[in-house]
Amino acid sequence: MKRYRLISLIGLAILLAACSQPPAQTHQPISAGITVTTEGVRHFQGQVVVGYQDEAALQEAIGKLGAVEIARIPELRAALLQVKGNAVKASRTLKGLPGIRYAEPHLAQILPPSEDPVEQPRHRNEALQTLGNPSDQILDELPQYALDPRHLNAKAAWDLGFEGEGVVVAIIDDPADVTHPDLAQNWAGKAYDPVTNTTYTDPNGWLSFINNNPNLSHGTFVASAVSAAKDGRGIAGLAPKTKFLPVAIFQPNYVGDFYVARGIVWAVNNGAQVLNNSWGGLGYGNLVKEAFDYALANGVVVVASAGNSYKDEVRTPAGYPGIIASAAADGNRNKTAFSTFGRHISSAAPGLDVLLANPTWLGGGYGLISGTSFSGPYTAAAAALVKAACPGATPYQVRRALETTTWERSFSREKGWGHLNVGNLANLLSQGCTALPAPGSVVKIKVEYFNENGLFPGLFADVMLRGKGLRAGDSTDPTPVYWARTDMSGEAWFYEIAPGEYDIYVAGADLSLTGGLPEERGTFVGTLVATPGSSPGNPDFKLVRLNASEVNLNPHDPYEPNDNLAQAQPLTYGTLTQLAYIFGQPRDFDYFAFSGSAGDAIRARVYAKSSIGGTLDSYLYLLDANGNVLAENDDMVPGQITDSEISLTLTVTGTYYLVVTSYTIASSPTAADDSPFNKYRLELTKTN
Amino acid sequence: MRLWRNQLLKNVGLLLLTLLLGLSACTPQDTLRPTVTISQPQDGTTVNASLVTVQGNAQDNIRVARITYQINGGSEQALNITPAPRVDFQFSVTLQEGQNTITVNAYDPSGNKGTKTVSITYNPQAIHTLSGTLVSEYAGGPVAGSTLKLYKEGNLVATTQSGADGSFTFDTLPPGVYRLEAQKPGMAGSALEGIRVPEMPSVTLIQRRAFDTSASTTPPTLVITQDGTQPIEGETFTNTIPFRVQVDTTKDYVRPMRYIYVALGRTPGSAFVVNSPTWTRRIFTDTEDTGNQSLAGSNVAGFGSQTGETVYLEVVAYDFNENRSHYLIPITFINTASSQNNTVSTPTGVAATAITLTQAVGFYDLKAPARLTVPLAKGKAETGELTLDPQAVPAGSNLYVEVRWCYTATAVPFAFDIERSTDGTNWMRVGTVGGARSSSCPTNPFNRPFYFRDASPDLTPGQTYHYRVVARGANRAESVASSTTPLPPFFAPLLSPPDESTGVSLTPDFTIGHPQLSIGADGAAYNLVLWDTLTGDSVAWQTLAGYSLMVEFGTQDNGIPDGEAVVYGFHPGVEDLVVFTDTAGLLNPTRPNVVPVNVSQGTFTVPYNFDGFAQLPQLQTLRTYAWQLYVSYAYKYNPQEGYRISAYSVQTWPSSTSFIRITRPGTQVFDFTTGQ
C-alpha cells in the first residue's frame, strides 16, 4: 500500500485543459472584444454571428435576442450581433428562427502569433554581408538561403521573367508595415481594418492605427516573404513584383471569425488574387469556411500555414477543402520538427530561420524568424508567380503547378508533394498556360432529412469525401480526404478539390449541437465522381436524403404558456407529459399544478438530456399553494444523471406546483438558456 | 598496284624486325625504383621514449637487394635482409630529444633507390592522454564517425575519429595548449580552443547538425579581449571581469551569427540546461561584437577565492550554419565575497531526478523547443570534465539529471558544489553554483529552490548515480546523497483504432502499447484526448478531465506481483483516487477491470467514456475523430528514498510550467471515422 500513497503529486497535477485557452483580456482601444471560454468554446463575449436568408429574418433574430447589430458581411449574408447574455446560449436560441442559415458564437479559437512560440523574431540591426555564405544566397543585399538555388531557386524563375508582376497578395495577418523601406514600393495602396470596416489608403493613417504596438510584427515578416522589393537593399520576396494588401485580423489579439470573414471578402473584392493565411487553430467554423469558399469561387488562390503543432493533424483553415496547406522546411529541405503535417499538406517551403523584414516601429531592418507562418507566404508568392503568368489559372491548377514542380515530385505526409522549386515552376510556366495541370472540381452536396413528418433541410450534417483507393495510414499515399459541414440550407460545398472518385459519407445533424439521440442521426454511404472542370456555377452535385429526425428549430410546446402560477397546467398522479421545452424566452419556467393529500408519497421525475437526449440539464422545484419552495433538485446523480427528481411525502392537503427549468437558469438570476433542443417530459407518480 | 603491295609488305616486315630488336635491347634496362612504406611510427607523431621500433616494407618489380636507414640525415646503416620483390623490415633506433627524421632507403639490383622519411618527435614529457566525448547538443546523443583533428601551436599533431558512443582519445601528448576540431559531412564544424594538457584530461565537444549542409563548416574565429585591445588571458581580476568578444570578420564563417555566450567556470549554453538560480551566464544574440561587457555578481558566484585562483573564462559562439567555437581562457580570479568566511550547514532535501526526453529538444535556441521556462533565475551551468563511459545518451533524445535542494540555515554558503558518484564512495564534482539560502523547502522536489542540471554526456540509462550537494564557506558541509537511475527513451505507440480507419465502433476501445517493463520503469502516466475538430470544434473526450491515468505492471519496486497490474487515477468527479483495474486484488478485492491490461503483450485498453467524462455517451455515426496521447511518460520509483519518483522518461508533455518545465508537444495522432 505504501507505494500507492506515493502517486506523485506531479502525476496528479491537472493539465491545462486541451479544449480551452485561458481567456485573454485586451486593453487595446482597437479591440474586437473580450474573449471568454464557455462550454469549451473560446469566443468573444456576448457576440453572435448569424447567417441569414433575408433582411426580415435577420431583423427578427435581432428582435428576438434584443441584440444590437455590430457589423455585417453582405456577400456572405452574415451579421455580427451583440447580445447581453451568454453568446453560446444565445446562438442556440437564434437557431429557432426560420430564415437563419446558421448562428454561432463569435469564435476566437485562433491564437495570435505572439502566443505561438515558434515565431519569435530575432532582430538584427547592422547590415549583413556575405562571407562564408555562398554568393548565390545574395539575391538582393543580405544572405537568403531560402531563395538560393538549393532551396526555392528564385533567381531561375526571375531570370525567366516570372516575378509576380500585376498580382495582389492579401496578407491576412496582423497589420503589415507598409512603410518599411523594403515593402513600401510594393504596397497595394490599401490596407484594411475589418473591425471598424476602415480602408486605409494613407500610410500614416495605417501607422497610427498600428500605434507602435510592440506586439504587432508578424504580418510584416510575412509580407516581406512575398513582396519585399528586389532593389539592391535588404532582402527580396519570392515574388518581388507583387503588391501586398494588408488585412488586420490580429490587433494584436485575434479579432474573431466574423471579422476574419469580412477581411477575406474585402480582400477578394479589392483585387487580391492570392490570400496568405499564416494562422490557424483547431475546429470547424462555418463562417470562415464560407468566406474562403467565396474566395475560391472567385478564382482566388488560398494558402494557409499547416501549423506549428509538431503533429500529424488537420488544423483550420489549412484543412478546409481547396486550401493549399504549407509545411515548414529547414535549411536542408527536410520538414522542421515543429511543422504540422499530414495527408492534407500540399508542399513545403523554408520556415526555419528565414531572414525577413522587421517592422519600422520595432526598429526596422531584418530578423531571423521561424514557423509555418513563413513557409506559407513563400508558397503564396509561388502561387502569385503562376497567377501573374496565367491569370485565368484556377486555384486547383495553381496548386498542382506548385506540386508538380517541387524538388521531390513525390508525396509524403511530412512535406506534401515536396519542397517548392520555383525554377522548375518557371520552366513549366515558360511552356504557356495551356501546359498547366488540369483544373479541379467543385462539388456541392445537398442534404435533406425525411421522416414521417415530411422533408426538411439537412442542416448541421457531416459530409466527408474520401478518395477511392485510399491506403489508410500510408504516409506516402496522396489520396485526399475532405470534410465539410452543411449550412442551415443543408448544403456542403467542396471548392477546388482533386477530381476523381470518392466514397461519400453523410451523417445527419451534429448531436453535440442538437442534443439528439444517436438513432436520430441518419447516415448515407455512397460514391461520387468529381469531374475536372466542374465549377461554382456548374458543380458536381449530389442530393442526399437521410432518414433522420429533422432538426426542429422551432418546436411546439403543448403546455405553453405556463410561465407562472396562474398559467400552471394541471397534472394528475400517474401522468407522463408530452414533450415540452425550456425554450421560447431567455428564462423559461414551466409550471404544472396538481392536487395532493396529506400523507401522499409523491415522486416527480424530469426526463431530459440524460434519458431522452437534447440539451436540457433540468432543474425541478416543488412549490406549495402559495408558491413557497418545498423541495428542489438539480441532478438525480450529481455529475452523471443530470435529470431531476423529487420524492416527498405531502403533509398538507391542497394544491402543489412543479416547476421545470434549466440548471443554467436556476443557478443564476441573469443567465439565459433558450434552446429548441431543451426538451423534457415530466412524470408525477404517487408511490404509496 | 601489285608492286606497291609488295613494297608495303616489305616495309611492314622491316618495321616488325625493328620492334623486336628494340624490345630485346630494353629488357636489362630496369629504371623502376623500389617503393618504401613505413607503417610505424607514423609521420609527425610524438613519442615519449627514446627507443623507437621502425616497421615497414620495401617492394620492387625485380627485387629489393639492399635496405639502409639514416637517422637525422646521418650515414646509411645497412639492414640484414634476404633479397626479394617484397621485404618486410623492422629495426630499432634511438632518438634524440626533439624532432628526428628517420629515412629508409631500398635499392634494387640495378641500383635504383627508393626512399621514405618520417619525422618523429621525441619528448620525454609526451606522456599525457586527452580523451573526450562528441555530442550533438547539451544532454544530447553522441556524434559518431566525426573526424577529430588536434592542433598544437597551429600544427596538426594527431587525427582520430569519434567512436559509436562519441568518444575519442589522443595519447602521448606533451603538455601544452591545444585546439581540437571536429568535422563530419552533414554536421556543422566545431572547434575547442585552449585545451590545457595535462590539466584537462577530458573534454566535451558539441557538434550540431549543419543548418545547411551546402554552407561552410568553418567555425567562427573569435577575438576575446578585455575591451577590444587589452588581453584577457592570464590576467588577474577582482570580482568583475571585463570582456569583449568580437568575431574576426576576415575569417570564414556563415552570417549572421546566432549566439555568443560568455561564462566563468563552466561551458555556457542553453539557459534551461545550464542555468541555475544562483549562477548565470551572459548571452549575446545576432551580433558579431558584444561591445564592452563584464561578468560580475551572479556570473561569478561561487568561483574564485580571496587569494585568487585559476578559473577558466569560457566563450561559445554559433554562426548561422551552427558552426561552433568554444574558447577556454585561464584567468586568475579574486572573489572577495565575505561568505567565504561563513561556517555553513549541510544542504537539505537533496533530490536527484533523471529526465529522459524521447524527442530531443535541440537545446540552445528559442524555436526548436518552443519556450523554455526557467522558474527561478537565469544563468547557466555546465558540467565539469568527466571520465568516459560508453553508451551515453541514446541518439535523438536528451538525458539530464535535475538535482534540487534546500538550504534553510542562516549562514549563507559561498558556493554549492554538486558532486556525483556511481558507488556512493568516490565523488567527483560535476558543477558549482553560487551559494544562497531560502527559508522555503517545498515537499515537491521539483519546487525546491536550488537546482543544477547535470547534462554530462556520459549519463547512461540503467546506471545508478548518487548526487550530493556540498555547501562551501569556511568549511565544507556535505549533504545526504540522493540517487537516481535514468530510464531509456519511452514511446507508447497508439495501436487501435488504427490511423485513418473507418467503420469504428461508436464506443471504441483505445488500445495503446505500454513498454514499461522493457525500459525498466515502474509505471507510466497517460492522458488521452479525443478531438472532434474535423467537423466539430471541441474535445469529445479527455480522460479523467485532464488528470493522468497511471498504469503499473508488476515490478520489484512498485509492489505489484509479476504479471499483475494496477490502473488508477484521480477522478475529479468523485474527487478521489479510483482504482480502475487491479488484476491481483491488491487494493480492491473485487479486482476491477475497467481499463483492461495485457501484461504479456505490453498493452492496455481504454474503453470509451470509462470515466464518464466524454461529451456524449457514444460517438456520432460517420464522423471523423482524432485521438492522441496528450501526456505520456514513464517513471521509476526509488524505494530507498521513500518511493519518491526519481526518474522520468517523457514521450510527450504539454506544459512548460509544471513538472519538467519543458513542453514536448509532438505526439502521434490517429484519426478514425465511426461506422453507421
Image (cartoon, rainbow, N blue to C red):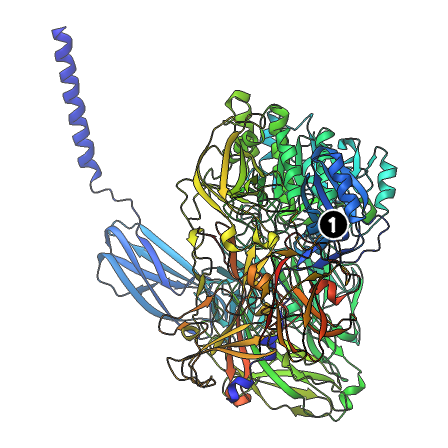
Q: Amino acid at mark 1?
A: Tyr
**Place of residue A668 in the rendered image (x, y in percent of width and height, measured from the top left):** 77, 65
In the depicted structure, whether residue B660 falls above or below residue A500: below
**Place of residue B169 in the rendered image (x, y in percent of width and height, measured from the top left):** 47, 70
Q: Is residue A467 left or right of residue B21?
A: right
Count the numbered circles shown: 1
Residue found farthest to the top: B1
Q: Is residue A118 visible?
A: yes
Q: Is residue A103 left or right of residue A149?
A: right
Answer with the quarter of the image where residue A276 lies. Answer: top right
Q: Residue at x 68, y 26 (%)?
A: A165
The chain that hosts pointer 1 is A
**Place of residue B1 in the rendered image (x, y in percent of width and height, measured from the top left):** 14, 5
Q: Is residue B351 left or right of residue B488?
A: right
Q: Nearer the viewer, residue B601 or A512?
A: A512
Q: Is residue B313 visible?
A: no
Residue that badge 1 annotates: A254
Q: Nearer the viewer, residue B182 or A141?
A: A141
In the depicted structure, whether residue A278 falls above or below residue B146: above
Answer with the quarter of the image where residue B383 lies. Answer: bottom right
Q: Callout 1: 10 Å neighbours few (<14), some, many (20+)?
A: many
**Place of residue B625 in the rendered image (x, y in percent of width and height, measured from the top left):** 52, 54
In the depicted structure, whether residue A388 falls above or below residue A254: above
Helix, strand or loop under label 1: loop
Q: Dividing the image into 4 quarters, which one contains the C terminus of chain A?
A: bottom right
Q: Nearer the viewer, residue B230 or A24?
A: A24
Q: Nearer the viewer, residue B249 or B435?
A: B435
In the depicted structure, whether residue A132 falls above or below residue B510: above
